[in-house]
């Protein structure tokens, strides 16, 4: 597990997500409630991401469908790609913003919200095809060659990845309980209310349960979510790489309130079953996704081969710091992280 010692993060980053030249911010809690998937590196897809998608690197693969559900409040940019988009097809609505070149075919996504206009902004050259889905009359407007234009650059919310990584480690130092179970086929994740109030700001610690586990705890068998809708579960999972193959038992009720924090993973995590809840794995390469993940995912890179990322925005309560006022004119109207000074000690630390 992560070393049991104190952490001191002086003035952690001023922003987790910020729009250039006009800083708006999102806490990790709000980030996971706004985006369905975020990567600092590449995203390869053969499946669908029901909500917003933010790719810090290149978007590759065969196809990605986005915007399949009514999206939570947030930015107009429903698909953001900082690098190139060479994926075969992007289906979406709202705004698609691509920093580099794009060869992808682009379609308007029918369904909930799918009749909205689709505006595509490309920094480099666009050499794909675009059209509205059959049965819709929605126009698609594509503009390319925009790199260097101030208005174009301002369309990119910026993610402070190091701040997210630091926050992931911070969560791992919260006092909690080791995740114990007697039956690998029936691991029960229950609410214990064991969080310590003075280890976080602006949260109701009485409704938060913190567990410490390892990847090996979820390599097989099953797990059940057994807590109320007003409870939050933080599952800190140690291990640098491995496989997540435990299956949820009895449905995924409560997925919006559970955070799986793979704070130690720097290699590949093969996801071979359904993960019920949001995932924070800022150093890891997540692959496979057999079965659909029921929540938001933040990772270094994602290969979405077999399963989908379903829109179950995070609604739990995480420890925060004092919010920074955000001018109403900014594109992201959510307050978030300012300076941070943290000294946390896991239970049992020296």
Image: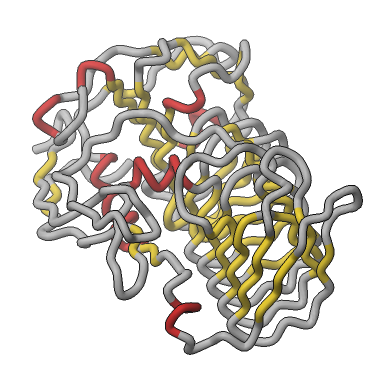
In percent of the image, x 61 and y 37: which residue is there? 70
Residue 78 visible? The answer is yes
Spot occupied by residue 306 in the image (x, y as percentages of width and height): 76, 44
Spot occupied by residue 99 in the image (x, y as percentages of width and height): 56, 77
Q: Quadrant of the C terminus?
A: top left
Q: Quadrant of the N terminus?
A: top left
Residue 168 visible? The answer is no
- From what the image shows, is residue 85 above or below residue 166? below
* Apparent side of residue 224 relative to residue 347 in the rendered image (left or right): right
Spot occupied by residue 9 in the image (x, y as percentages of width and height): 14, 55
Q: Residue 164, located in which quarter of the rendered image?
A: bottom left
In percent of the image, x 74 and y 61: which residue is there? 90
Tag count: 0
- From what the image shows, is residue 160 above or below residue 116? below
Spot occupied by residue 335 in the image (x, y as percentages of width and height): 26, 48
In percent of the image, x 44 and y 35: which residue is there? 260
* Apparent side of residue 15 relative to residue 109 in the rendered image (left or right): left
Q: Name the residue at the front extreme.
A: 137
* Apparent side of residue 253 relative to residue 69 in the rendered image (left or right): left
* Apparent side of residue 104 relative to residue 288 in the rendered image (left or right): right
Q: How is the image coloured?
A: secondary structure
């Amino acid at each position: 597990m992560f070393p049991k010692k104190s952490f001191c993060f002086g003035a952690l980053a001023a922003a987790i997500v910020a729009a250039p030249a006009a800083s708006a911010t999102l806490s990790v809690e709000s980030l996971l409630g706004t985006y369905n998937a975020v990567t600092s590196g590449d995203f390869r897809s053969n499946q669908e991401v029901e909500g917003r998608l933010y790719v810090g690197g290149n978007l590759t693969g065969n196809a990605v469908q986005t915007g399949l559900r009514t999206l939570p409040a947030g930015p107009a940019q429903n698909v953001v790609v900082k690098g190139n988009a060479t994926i075969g097809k992007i289906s979406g609505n709202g705004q698609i913003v691509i920093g580099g070149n794009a060869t992808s075919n682009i379609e308007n996504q029918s369904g909930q919200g799918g009749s909205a206009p689709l505006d595509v902004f490309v920094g480099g050259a666009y050499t794909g095809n675009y059209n509205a889905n059959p049965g819709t009359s929605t126009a698609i407007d594509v503009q390319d060659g925009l790199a260097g234009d101030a208005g174009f650059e301002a369309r990119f919310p910026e993610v402070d990845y190091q701040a997210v990584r630091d926050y992931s480690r911070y969560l791992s130092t919260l006092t909690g309980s080791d995740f114990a179970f007697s039956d690998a086929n029936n691991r029960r994740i229950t609410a214990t209310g064991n969080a310590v109030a003075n280890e976080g700001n602006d949260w109701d610690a009485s409704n938060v349960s913190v567990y410490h586990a390892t990847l090996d705890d979820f390599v097989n068998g099953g797990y059940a979510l057994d807590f109320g809708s007003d409870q939050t579960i933080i599952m800190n999972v140690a291990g640098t790489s491995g496989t997540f193959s435990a299956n949820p038992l009895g449905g995924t009720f409560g997925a919006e309130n559970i955070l799986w924090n793979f704070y130690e993973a720097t290699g590949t995590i093969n996801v071979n079953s359904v993960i019920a809840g949001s995932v924070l794995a800022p150093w890891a390469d997540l692959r496979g996704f057999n079965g659909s993940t029921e929540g938001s995912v933040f990772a270094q890179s994602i290969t979405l081969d077999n399963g989908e990322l379903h829109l179950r925005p995070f609604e739990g309560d995480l420890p925060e710091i004092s919010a920074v006022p955000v001018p109403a004119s900014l594109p992201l109207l959510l307050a978030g992280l300012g300076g941070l000074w943290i000294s946390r000690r896991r239970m049992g630390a020296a």
